[in-house]
Image: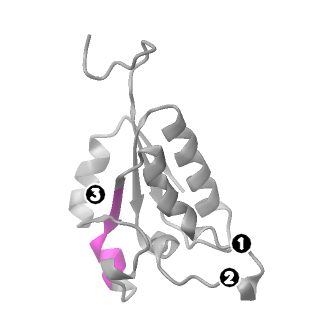
């Protein structure tokens, strides 16, 4: 039996979710988070990549009172409980927005755009939000 076989006989697939949008103003960020949790519940190999304005989804100190929306950013800290531990952030996106790894609410691996492209090539499924 190969390493990639699950107990139930199915094959584990590598799913990568790319978050590109700001956390509020559209449904993309919240929908992505829900899909990630579903994938993890089905014991798939899940990676989550934050690029462009998607880096704002995991920044500390989000205050949504002025826009009357629930701040769902603390949910990203729960990903570890679902064995979603492969979180990546594009270095160039952080730098372009004046952010650093210390500004983020979860532990991530900061990668260059080229390294992220390589990571994406290793995936079975890539979904962009």
Residue occupying image coordinates x 22% and y 61%: 114
Image location of residue 45, percent across then percent down: 38, 37
* Direction from residue 27 to residue 43 in the image, left or right: left
Determine the CA span between mark 1 and mark 2: 6 Å
* Direction from residue 43 to residue 85 in the image, left or right: left
Q: Nearer the viewer, mark 3 or mark 1?
A: 1
Residue occupying image coordinates x 55% and y 46%: 37
Task: Specify the label residue 10 is tagged with.
Answer: none
Task: Tell me the residue that label 3 is attached to.
Answer: 116
Instruction: Choose between 56 and 72: the one closer to the eye.
Output: 72
Does residue 91 show up magenta in the picture? yes
Determine the CA span between mark 2 and mark 3: 30 Å
Image location of residue 27, percent across then percent down: 68, 62
Task: Tell me the residue that label 1 is attached to.
Answer: 70
Determine the CA span between mark 3 and mark 1: 30 Å
Mark 1 in CB contact with mark 2 (< 8 angstroms): yes
Task: Specify the label residue 64 is tagged with.
Answer: 2
The magenta region covers 87-95
Q: Quadrant of residue 28?
A: bottom right
Q: Secondary structure at mark 3?
A: helix
| Outermost right residue | 68
């Amino acid at each position: 039996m190969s390493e990639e076989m699950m107990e139930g006989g199915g094959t584990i697939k590598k799913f990568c979710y790319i978050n590109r949008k700001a956390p509020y103003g559209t449904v993309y960020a919240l929908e992505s988070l829900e899909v990630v949790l579903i994938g993890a519940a089905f014991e798939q190999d899940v990676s989550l990549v934050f690029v462009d304005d998607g880096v704002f989804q995991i920044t500390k100190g989000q205050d949504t009172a002025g826009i009357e929306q629930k701040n769902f950013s603390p949910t990203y800290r729960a990903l570890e409980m679902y064995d979603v531990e492969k979180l990546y952030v594009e270095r160039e996106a952080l730098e372009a927005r004046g952010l650093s790894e210390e500004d983020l609410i979860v532990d991530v691996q900061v990668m260059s755009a080229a390294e992220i492209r390589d990571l994406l090539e290793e995936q079975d499924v890539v979904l962009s939000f």
